[in-house]
Amino acid sequence: MIGKLISFLVQRKYVVYFLFIAITAITLLLTLLPPDNFQGQAIFSYDKIGHFLMFFGWSFMFGLSLILYSRQEAPLLFIFVAGTLFGISIEFMQEMLTQGRTASWTDAAADSAGTLTAVILLWWIKTKYRQYLRPILSQNSAR
């Protein structure tokens, strides 16, 4: 089933790009809009799990787009660093640019944990499902 999903995504790169852009926009909206824009409603009552899931999704889609469409093999360390820096930069922006929000190192830690989990899953996919990625990887190395 995972192999079929990977094959589907390999053949339809626009889906991966759309999901990456959508998750990026949703992450920025949920983390940078003032909390009063949500009319006192808790979108997700477990804040750290929400951070974990947002950055897991963002890092996974970012990494998948790099694995499927870059000219080189995507370095997993780069994906981890990019996701972690994205999370830390959002925390700084919350402190500096928004009212009603403050930076939280525990949020940044949850962001990094989500990113790390996504990188581990990407490594597993690259290892176990390499045959589904082989046409793309060989095509990219020929460029």
Image: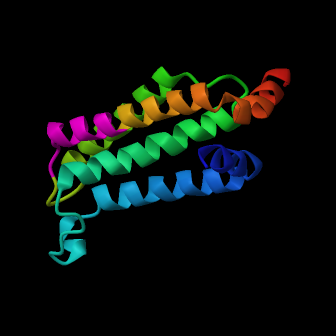
Q: Residue furthest bottom?
A: 39
Q: Does residue 50 appear left or right of residue 120 in this picture? A: left
Residue 109 or 94: which is nearer the viewer? Answer: 109
| Residue sitting at x 80%, y 32% | 135
Furthest-front residue in this view: 1
**Residue found at the very far right of the displayed protein:** 142
Residue closest to the eye, 96 or 32: 32
Look at the magenta stretch and give its main secondary structure.
helix
User: Quick check: 79 above or below 29?
Assistant: above
Please report the residue visible at 71 percent of the width from the left and 46 percent of the height from the top. 7
Query: In the rendered image, which quarter contains the C terminus?
Result: top right
The residue located at (53%, 41%) in the rendering is 62
Q: Position of residue 49 (x, y in %)?
A: 24, 50
Residue 137 spot, x, y in % from top left: 75, 27
Which range is magenta? Answer: 102-114
**What residue is shown at x 29% (from left), y 45% (from top)?**
52
* In-front residue for pair 40/133: 133
